[in-house]
Amino acid sequence: MGGSAPWIHPSSIIDEGATIGNDTKIWHFSHIMENVSIGSKCILGQNIMIGRDVKIGSGCKIQNNVSIYSGVILEDNVFCGPSCVFTNVLNPRAHLDRKNEFQKTYVRHGATIGANATILCGIEIGRFSFIGAGSVVISSVESHALMVGNPARRVGWVSESGDTLNEELVCPRTGQQYTLDLENGLTRNYEIDGV
């Protein structure tokens, strides 16, 4: 497979049973709990907590002060901005044990979650979608959707490079053309742009 062994700052704690891919870096004061799987070439900033059984794909960047709780699954190349928040129970109470109510949250390939955004559990964040800073996402998000506000609403579409598409659904940076299909959402039109 190649690559270098993961680099882990001495102040971080890695529990038994966690697996970490090559070329991944884990910075100060982080805690990776048991049975976590982290892919290769990830960067985890300082003060990160990854809960039991969480799966994180390759190429992910998780900025400072993020906790990813049991039930959350990040696919490859997901960006989690500083202090973004995930939940795993809809109606938590301190005096009630609701671990049997944890819900799955899927963050699909290439999605971006902005700083201080909150993601409620039991939903799916679509491929290459972009969640604006401070947004509160309470329902599933389409691929390539640009979401802002509380509650978050779609205000546009973004390309694979994260740029807002124009009215013709063309990326201003790359010239890539996208197509909106009511059944499948937004997809890149490879036949037209050839990129």
Image (spheres, rainbow, N blue to C red):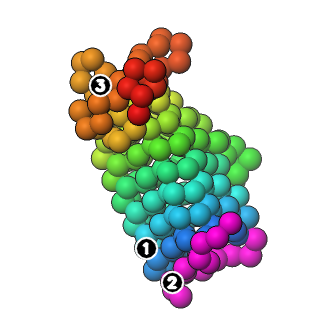
As measured in the structure, the alpha-carbon distance from the residue carrying label 1 to the one carrying label 3 is: 37 Å
Residue 126, horizontal then vertical, whole percent:
50, 34
Q: Secondary structure at mark 2?
A: loop
Above or below, 156 against 34 in this view is above
Query: Tag 3 or tag 1, which sits nearer the N-term?
Result: 1
**How many numbered discs?**
3
Q: Which residue in the protein does label 1 denote?
A: 46
Of tags 1 and 3, the one toward the viewer is: 3
Give the answer, above or below, for where 50 lies relative to 186.
below
Magenta highlight on residue 6: yes
Residue at the disc numbered 2: 9
Q: Residue at x 47, y 30 (%)?
A: 143
User: Quadrant where the C terminus lies?
Assistant: top left
Q: Vertically, is 94 above or below 26?
A: above
In this view of the protein, can residue 159 be seen by the observer? Answer: yes
Disc 3 marks a residue whose amino acid type is Val
Q: Main secondary structure of the magenta part?
A: loop
Depth check: 177 or 56 in front? 177
The residue where tag 3 is placed is 170
| Horizontal side of residue 133 vs 40, given as left or right | left
> Which residue occupies the extreme front position in the image?
194
Magenta span covers which residues? 1-17
Residue neighbourhood size for the residue with mark 3, other residues' Cα within 10 Å, grouped as few (<14), some (14–19), many (≥20): many
**How far apart are the alpha carbons under marks 1 and 2?**
9 Å
The one nearer the camera, 56 or 188, is 188
Which three-letter amino acid code belongs to the residue tagged 2?
His
Q: Which quadrant, please, contains the N terminus?
A: bottom right
Question: Pointer 2: residues within 10 angstroms few (<14), some, or many (20+)?
Answer: few
Q: Residue at x 57, y 57 (%)?
A: 58
